[in-house]
Amino acid sequence: MIRHRRMVRDFEHRPVPREVLERILDVGRRGPTAGFSQGVDFLVLQTPEELELFWSTTEPDRRERTIDGPPVIVLPLSNKHAYLERYSKPDKRGLGMDVEEGWPVPFWDVDTAMAAMLVLLAAVDEGLGGWFFGIFHGEDELLSALGVPEGVRPIGAIALGPPSAGERPAGSALSERRRPLGEVVHWGRW
């Protein structure tokens, strides 16, 4: 199934049953988290009002997405505080990771990215298309309107839904080729 995973940007605008979304998100929550911190949450937007809020806040110049965009947006949310709290407990104390500066990389974002990838793969298994994209404008306003707690933030957004009949690969996938395995894998040293 992994070879069939690609970013889908053109969706049929029909609802995705809740049980399908729950199966997909259940796969996403099973990704690894440092110290089993479990600082990953998903915020699902699917009503016309929720989708309108998302698009009008993040892409006000492209409001047509509300009409012809995906029927579901999932915000994969990273909770740094869950990691700092977990690493302040007795079994993790002493590692210096109870403060943000103690982490070599922000695993709260890394783990949330892994969860997002699992969501994209699970969507393929359910016969849906998925598209991961960044939120470049209006993030603070959106999070406030959605009641997201302070310190919890999206690493991007995932669009989900049935691909339209005419959906075809687009963007960089057409102009760029995937690097060959021999260029990507380094055995023993660079």
Image (tube, grey):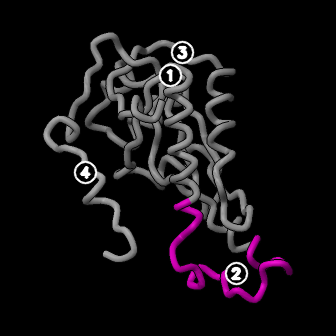
Q: Amino acid at mark 4?
A: Pro
Tell me where the magenta segment starts and ends, as one range.
Answer: 86-110
Q: Earlier in the sequence, mark 4 or mark 1?
A: 1
Q: Rate crowding at label 4 as few (under 14), some (14 to 19) or many (20 or more) other CA atoms within 10 Å.
A: few
Q: Earlier in the sequence, mark 3 or mark 4?
A: 3
Comparing labels 4 and 2, the label whose residue is closer to the camera: 4
Point out which mark residue 15 bears: 3
Q: At 26% from the left edge and 22% from the top edge, which residue is drawn?
A: 168
Tell me the residue that label 1 is attached to.
Answer: 48
Point out which mark residue 98 bears: 2
Tell me the residue that label 4 is attached to.
Answer: 180
Q: Amino acid at mark 1?
A: Pro
103 up-or-down from 19: above or below? below
Q: Amino acid at mark 3?
A: Pro
Residue 15 x/y as whole percent: 54, 15
Q: At 45% from the left edge and 35% from the top edge, which residue is drawn?
A: 2
Q: Rate crowding at label 1 as few (under 14), some (14 to 19) or many (20 or more) other CA atoms within 10 Å.
A: few
